[in-house]
Image: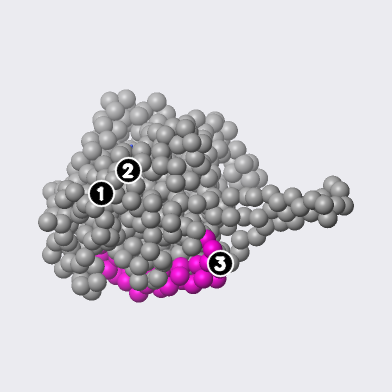
Amino acid sequence: MPGINSSLLRHLKQPERFAALDRVARQGDRWDGRVFRVSNPSTGELLAELPDMGVEQTRIAIDRAHVAQAEWAARTARDRSDTLWRWHQLILDHTDDLAAILTAEMGKPLPEAVSEVSHAAAYLQWYAEEANRIYGETISAPSTDRRMLVIKQPIGVVGTITPWNFPASMVARKISPALAAGCAIVLKPAEQTPLVAGAMFALAAEAGFPDGVVNLIYASDGAAVGRELCSNRKVRKISFTGSTEVGRLLMRQCSDQVKKVSLELGGNAPFIVFDDADVDAAVDGAIQAKFRNAGQTCVSANRLYVQSGVHDEFAAKFTARVRSLSVGDGFEPGIAIGPLIDTQALVKIEAHIADAIQKGGAICCGGRQAGHGGTFFEPTVLTDITSEMLLAQEETFGPLAPIIRFEDPDQVVREANDTIYGLAAYFYASNLKRVWHVAEKLEYGMIGINTGRMSSEAAPFGGMKQSGIGREGSRHGLEEYLEMKYLCMGGL
Ligand code: NAP
């Protein structure tokens, strides 16, 4: 039988509140008895067995969302805003337990999990406020007997799919603007990290969302659920965060119905340090941009380009800092680097290092799996890296920092742009003219200038090229869930 295991409940302050997470997605629907397991990547402990929902349950959830949609859209903006505010407060009130669930199923250090839960709450706050700020427009008509105006309406039922690396904030970032706009949603979280989504949905029910407005699908077969969401005509939009490969597939599946998509996909972020940079600040920024979440973030610095004049100083200071990062179970105090999500992630990082060494790269620190069992990997710095190596072309998604020396500032921008991705880029420089020119030339949706961290609910998050379509966060994130309707009144 499904259920939550004591190895998870012992981490919680209010275990009784979250002990029934196996039932959150079931909601009385037909379920054929199949289950899937969720384990702690640090220890391998079984955390839960969840009911495995398939195509039929997805269809039921979509039907329910379709019915609830009309009533939710007809409410006042203030009413929707108030419900989002209540959910925001409940998330804040349960930060410790949500963070513990997140660390248990995903592995990130507990302080990072606490910070992710506050980031998730910040999206709910932002869109509780934005719900009241949906505006239309009036247009000067070309003749006196007409009036022309534009209204904005919710797009309808939204199918959302989220990844394992930020299992709380991705849920909030996607569904809070949809709910603020008046949409009902069906969410499928990643198979490896469904529990924090379940806990957030349990709190959403307490916040008072009407039946059917928020629907959760626990599933081990993401492809089957994805096909149903894309092909079901009652779903009017797909919002996906994950790999570029799956994003392309979903876009193809949505093309038959010309269904709208928002896609937040992979990256290959350059991090450039120019000769005129503050080197100590650049080292701080690189540590944040590279090693947060053990390098498993879509905006992770994947390639560190450092200009010759400061290369050796940067490499020495950066390597010293990386050596001091401790690896281990995210529940232990002082841990900076948790486990990788699974053994496939270990295989990828090892392949990237082997390829680099074979082509002339040198290891400054790390380079091996860290003991502890599980899927831990030592934070690693490589130098003598060239653009031909695999690690400069593919997203590593792990604690591996390759340093590439460069001479020519124009050439480095060309190299930084020479990728199919365009999500995030970072650079450190002090010359104002250079700052403007480089910021304008980099082909990325988000640029951190003299900072290694830029994600905020107030800013538009998203990428260019094959890193995605659309933006999340900020006022732009709300527009993604609204249809524009032009009204032309004649005979006046
Ligand atoms: P993924 O393999 O694409 O999985 C993401 C989600 O898609 C999971 O819920 C997964 O379900 C589901 N999925 C997998 N195959 C599917 C299919 N055929 N049809 C429908 N859904 C499917 O990505 P990931 O490895 O979890 O996440 C890492 C990637 O996400 C990285 O590339 C990272 O850069 C990107 N990412 C981007 C952003 C951004 O904002 N741009 C943010 C975070 C992460 P299962 O778990 O059941 O397989």
Residue 174 location, x and y as percent?
44, 54
Horizontal arrangement in the rendering, residue 192 relative to residue 256 (left or right): left
How many marks the image carries: the answer is 3
**Dot 3, crowdedness within 10 Å: few (<14), some or many (≥20)?**
many
Which numbered disc covers residue 331?
none
Amino acid on which disc 3 is placed:
Ala
Question: Which residue is label 3 attached to?
Answer: 77
First reached walking from the N terminus: tag 2 or tag 1: 1
Question: Which residue is label 2 attached to?
Answer: 225
Which numbered disc covers residue 53?
1
**Dot 2, crowdedness within 10 Å: few (<14), some or many (≥20)?**
many
First reached walking from the N terminus: tag 3 or tag 2: 3
Residue 101 part of the magenta-drawn span: yes
Amino acid on which disc 1 is placed:
Met
Residue 491 location, x and y as percent?
82, 52
> Which residues are drawn in magenta?
73-102
In whole angstroms, how far apart are the C-alphas of marks 3 and 2?
Answer: 31 Å
Q: Ligand 1 is located in which of the four quadrants?
A: top left
Callout 1 secondary element: loop
